[in-house]
Image: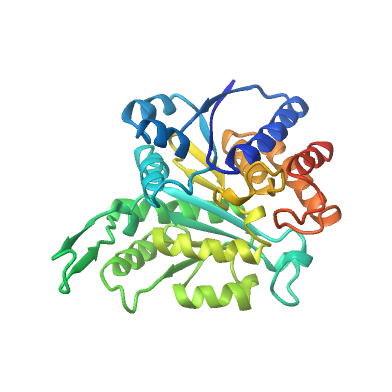
Amino acid sequence: MYKIAVIGGDGTGPEVVKEGLKVIEAASKKFGFKYETKDFDFNGERYMKTGKTLEDNDIAELKKFNVIYLGAIGHPDVKPGILEQGILLKLRFSLDQYINLRPIKLYNSAFCPLKDKKESDVDFVVVRENSEGLYKGMGEFKDKGTKDEVATQISYNTRKGVERCVRYAFEYTRRRNKRKTLTLCGKTNVLTFAWDLWQRAFNEVAKEYPDIKTNYAHVDATAMWFVKNPEWFDVIVTDNMFGDIITDLGAMVQGGMGIAAGGNLNPEGVSMFEPIGGSAPKYTGKNVINPLAAICAGAMLLEQLGEVKAAKAIEDSVIKIVKTKLKSLAAGKMGYSTTEVGDLVVKNL
């Protein structure tokens, strides 16, 4: 009996999670696994009513679950940063979800903005360090509000944090068993402290994986090659900030935010899965948002639980309807409503 904590969140988050749960329920009947869910109201509405985001007792309760299924965090009436830091980042840090995993896979070449790229050309994964770097929130102001103001933001990287991320990336590349190539994406020529550590850790861990080919690319070059030659990549490992940026670029290459799913992983603890497109408040309640990213996140969640066949069936169903049914992956342009797309995935399981 798997225990799934459900955080619908803000905006269209609850709508897409509802469709994801519909698909998980259908998969459970087909593949014979059991689960139970519990909803949590960690979102902007709750914050505006109570002034609370996420407290220590909330974290303690979430630790009792196997996985977390998240919709989206972000409310137009709440100052940017409050919910993101108070809920999203607190979840990642408190549950030590030190890996952000982002598969980038093209399901229909008609939806790729890149000229002459086939589905087989866009099939790679970004492993992003998820608990350190610039997102640690370390820094200070000096002379704030004056003409001499200085703002310092620290990129905090530990050997332990970097090495466990790099090691996970090597293991993942081996399990993925495709091109068996791992690329370190960084900025060693300018950020000479943090990326010296990353490069040394990468090189040392690489010695333990002689079956994995390795290479290096600056982050700006990586962005360029994502657009020009995405077929070059298999698995990429990088830090928190660079990973955040290049995975959004990857989402566009694979067809848009409507299909982009991600996982925040603690391989030894509680992991969290989500669509990466945000709360999209302008579409809230209109039944037009694309739920496929949330459905794909649900497939990743099941794979994490060990229900590999169910996860594969969901992905296969998504691929089928993206290839044969949808006019677009954009909200309001799919040719179907949010709930109808969920129904199509269930029908094609």
Q: Residue at x 42, y 46 (%)?
A: 78
Residue 148 x %, y % = 15, 73
- Please name whichever residue, 146 or 245, is drawn nearer the observer in this view of the structure: 146
Colour convention: rainbow
In the picture, measured across the screen, residue 264 lies left or right of residue 283, that is left
Q: Is residue 30 visible?
A: yes
Residue 309 x %, y % = 71, 37
Q: Is residue 212 visible?
A: no
Q: Residue at x 72, y 35 (%)?
A: 23
Residue 258 x %, y % = 66, 54
Above or below: residue 188 compared with residue 312? below
Above or below: residue 322 compared with residue 234? above
In the picture, measured across the screen, residue 208 lies left or right of residue 339, that is left
- Please name whichever residue, 43 or 69, is drawn nearer the observer in this view of the structure: 43
- Residue at the far right: name it: 324
Count of marks overlaid on the render: 0
Location of residue 242 by image quarter: bottom left
Quadrant containing the N terminus in the rendered view: top right
Quadrant containing the C terminus in the rendered view: top right
Q: Residue at x 73, y 73 (%)?
A: 117
Location of residue 104 by image quarter: bottom right
Q: Residue at x 62, y 39 (%)?
A: 303
